[in-house]
């Protein structure tokens, strides 16, 4: 019985050790998390600058968001407001 328990404990430690490295600990994972954080801050700042939901404020918010994303070398987003015809 003790041999079985010690074997199970050793197997548990082995599998727990292999599962310890999530994707966020890799260099690419950390870079992706940082990029998302910067993009969220840009969106928050753009929302604070233009809190209205009129067509003009939406366009200004989209422009402010894209400007901030470009300043941080991140890909811009598609406009949320429809294009004027």
Image (tube, rainbow, N blue to C red):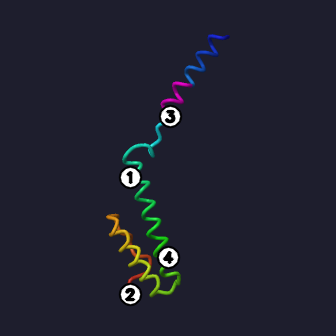
Q: Main secondary structure of the magenta part?
A: helix
**Which mark sits nearer the N-terminus, 3 or 4?**
3
Residue at the spot of label 2 = 84
Secondary element type, mark 1: helix
Q: Distance between the Cα atoms at labels 4 and 2?
A: 21 Å
**Which residue corresponds to mark 1?**
31
Q: Residue 79 sits in which quadrant? A: bottom left
Q: Which residues fall within the magenta stretch?
A: 13-19
- Label 3 belongs to which residue? 19
In the rendered image, the residue lying farthest to the right is 1
Assign a secondary structure to mark 2: loop
Q: Earlier in the sequence, mark 4 or mark 2?
A: 4
* Separation of residues labelled 2 and 3 (CA atoms): 51 Å
Residue at numbered disc 4 = 47
* Residue plotted at (42% across, 81% down): 82
Q: Quadrant of the N terminus?
A: top right
Q: Earlier in the sequence, mark 2 or mark 3?
A: 3
Work out how far the residue at label 1 is from the one at label 2, CA to CA, in angstroms: 36 Å
Q: Is tag 3's residue or tag 1's residue first in the polypeptide sequence?
A: 3
**The magenta stretch spans residue 35:** no
Q: Is residue 76 left or right of residue 50?
A: left
């Amino acid at each position: 019985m003790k041999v079985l328990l010690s074997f199970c404990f050793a197997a548990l430690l082995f599998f727990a050790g292999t599962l310890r490295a999530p994707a966020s600990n890799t260099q690419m994972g950390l870079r992706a998390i940082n990029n998302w954080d910067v993009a969220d801050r840009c969106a928050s700042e753009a929302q604070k600058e233009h809190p209205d939901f009129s067509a003009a404020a939406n366009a200004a918010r989209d422009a402010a968001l894209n400007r901030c994303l470009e300043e941080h070398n991140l890909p811009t987003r598609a406009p949320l407001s429809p294009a004027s015809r």
